[in-house]
Image (spheres, rainbow, N blue to C red):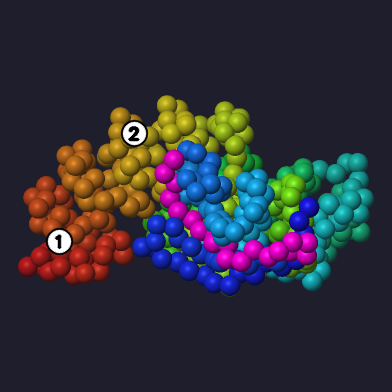
Amino acid sequence: MLKIKKIEFIKVLYDDALAQNIFSIANITFSNRSPIYGALLYWQQNQSAEPYTKEGDYKFFYDLAKAQYFAAVKFPKDCTLTKDERQELAYILLEERGAIGTYSFVTTKPKTPFHLKKAFQAIMFPEHFSVDHFNAISIMEKLESHDPSVYDGLPYERAFLENYIEWCRLAVKQHPSNLTPYLQYLPFSYICYANPFLSEQFLVDYLPRVSLEALQQNKAVLARLTISFKRYLVTYLLKNKKRIHPDFVDQLDDFIESNAFYSSFDVVYLPEADEVPDMDLHYFEYERGNYRWAGSEHLVKGIPSLICQKYNRYGDKRPTNTEMDEKFRGYNAEQKQLFTAIAELHWLNRYRDELDWSYVCQYNEHLTEQFLTAHLNYVDFNALGLNTDIAVNIDFLTTYLHRFNHQKAVPLIICHLTEQFYLTHKDEIKVDIDLLYKYMDNIDEDEFLRIEGYLME
């Protein structure tokens, strides 16, 4: 085994003009062999299905479903490592780099870490315990505030209740993936109310148990929900005559359609290093110490992260095809529909014959012109015209302009207006000054001003 003593990243470069986008140059010092100077860490678009580049560098893919990008390490010519050794050392370098893009790991642990399992095991649950007694948010709020009136209304001793609510208060702040073993002990309405890390995928997965009334109090989660789920939430509250949160009761349309509503509450989950499984190393030993990750000082925005293969930005593990197939089969009709709004293109293609494509076209944010062209037989252009969250090019809109419904305004077209496109198609499309102002945040500023001038004439 080769013992790595130190890894030093001496430079960070990023240049779109380069065929290979070098983002770090590393020097590796060993305690039992000569050092390696000038290993180049780089990323680039993938051009073949082979696991190795033409130069023999092993490819670490950003997205295994599409294999669109990969990261690799190019070692200096005098390096005598075998191919397997290079592969393992490349993995260590890329992992030690901390982040290959906008995803990084926290570098310090909390001063007093909360041990979820140990704290749970320390609670003496009575035999007649039922989590249903705690599903009302008002009950949890009274317990949190130690309101004396709540103790008489629950069939439990006060000492148990105080221990239980303290555990709940700390547990509910953990990432949802850590809470799965405790869902029969932790009120689900309280999770919806207080957990800042809930992703829309989690809400879809557990939709039959989700308390939408409690969820509307959770600003951190509401801040990142899509139009699809926010519309579902509001429709449910109105239909069932539930109390709507005063923050948006008088501006429901803005709440549903605006990406800026509660934007300051957005939370990006950065998992602890011990949540990420290590690769089994055969050739190298490397003691990373207590602070394993170099941190965000090395970040180069836009370069894909290796860890994105396993986790998304909110810490949810990406499912395998088999895992997703099982999950999808268990969805009810509402879950399937809501899933289509957030599903990545890989899943849309995999389940293409089982989806409501009108809903996909209207709400999914991942759609691209390449994907739409490849699935043209499924595309509902009337619904696609309402989708203002995707980016398509003018050539796509020009080619399929006749497929949209021009009896009314098409928001997708308005959001992509240019002066030339407007002048060429102004007799076909519907747009006036009010519509232009409505979607002005989506339009290039210079193009907006020029088109505004024509509409003001």
Q: Residue 443's x, y, as percent?
A: 27, 62
Q: Is residue 257 left or right of residue 382?
A: right
Q: Is residue 356 left or right of residue 183?
A: left
From what the image shows, is residue 440 above or below residue 279? below
* Mark sitting on residue 419: 1
From what the image shows, is residue 420 above or below residue 128? below
Which image quadrant is residue 321 in? Answer: top right
- Any magenta on residue 33? yes
**Of the residues under marks 1 and 2, which one precedes in the sequence?**
2
**How many numbered circles are shown?**
2
Amino acid type indicated by mark 1: Glu
Residue 331 appearing in the image: no
Mark 1 surroundings: few (<14), some (14-19) or many (≥20) residues within 10 A: some
Query: Which residue is drawn at the image coordinates 86% and 56% (left, top)?
Result: 119
SS class, disc 1: helix
Residue closest to the eye, 6 or 120: 6
Query: Which portion, as a residue range, is magenta?
Result: 30-48
Q: For mark 2, what is the residue?
A: 375
Asked if labels 2 and 1 touch by Cβ distance under 8 angstroms, the answer is: no
Amino acid type indicated by mark 2: His
